[in-house]
Amino acid sequence: MSTTTTAPIAVITGGSRGLGRNAALALAADGSDIALTYRSQADETAAVVAEIHKHGRRAHALQLDVADADPFAAFAQLKQVLAGWGPSQFDALVNNAGTGLHASFADTTPAQFDGLVAIHLKGPSFLRDNAQVDAMVSSVTALGRPGLPDDIGPAVAALLAPGIAWINAQRIEVSGGMLI
């Protein structure tokens, strides 16, 4: 395994299989060290970690259910892992963990809907609050800081102004210059 401390570090939620596994392996093949989370697939996760090691990269698996915001204190274990690897922060956060329902919206129960919201919205939000995302975003924006609600309001107002009514159905990048 590589012992360099200059390799990028990616944190991937739901890294035990599917898209998360493929992202972890692709990033490892490109030279990133990987910290991945999993909910219950310990054997599959161990296999992913072993594959990452075959790429000569470091890997750490952290059991974490993103639908439950309370265990995010366990995410602090990542700081210990990073300290052992050298850097004090990671370079990329891939909020991949998720699930889907095989039911129409009309047939979805409130409990099922709450579960989806917990996994796809609440979990990533709390993870972001407990991670080093602000520092990571600040390092890649032209303005050197994450966006604030005050940054978005004027863009929305401009898009709704009568003078530019011809602009519609557009994807407008409001990112502080992140994608320059």
Image (cartoon, rainbow, N blue to C red):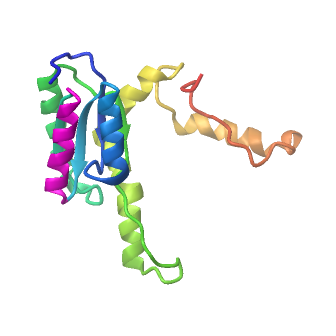
Q: Split into 4 quadrants, where in the image is the N terminus?
A: top left
Is residue 163 or residue 75 the one in the foreground?
75
Main structural element of the magenta stretch: helix, strand or loop?
A: helix
Side of 46 where 99 appears, left or right? right
Residue 73 visible here:
no
**Quadrant of the rendered image containing residue 54:** top left
Q: Residue furthest bottom?
A: 107
Q: Position of residue 161 (x, y in %)?
A: 81, 42
Please report the residue visible at 41 percent of the width from the left and 67 percent of the height from the top.
100
Q: Please name the residue shown 41% across and 78% down the image.
A: 110
Residue 154 picture quarter: top right
Is residue 5 visible in the rendered image? The answer is yes
User: Is residue 25 shown left or right of residue 53?
Assistant: right
Q: Is residue 45 magenta?
A: yes
- Residue 56, compared with residue 45, is above or below; it is above
Residue numbers of the magenta segment: 40-56
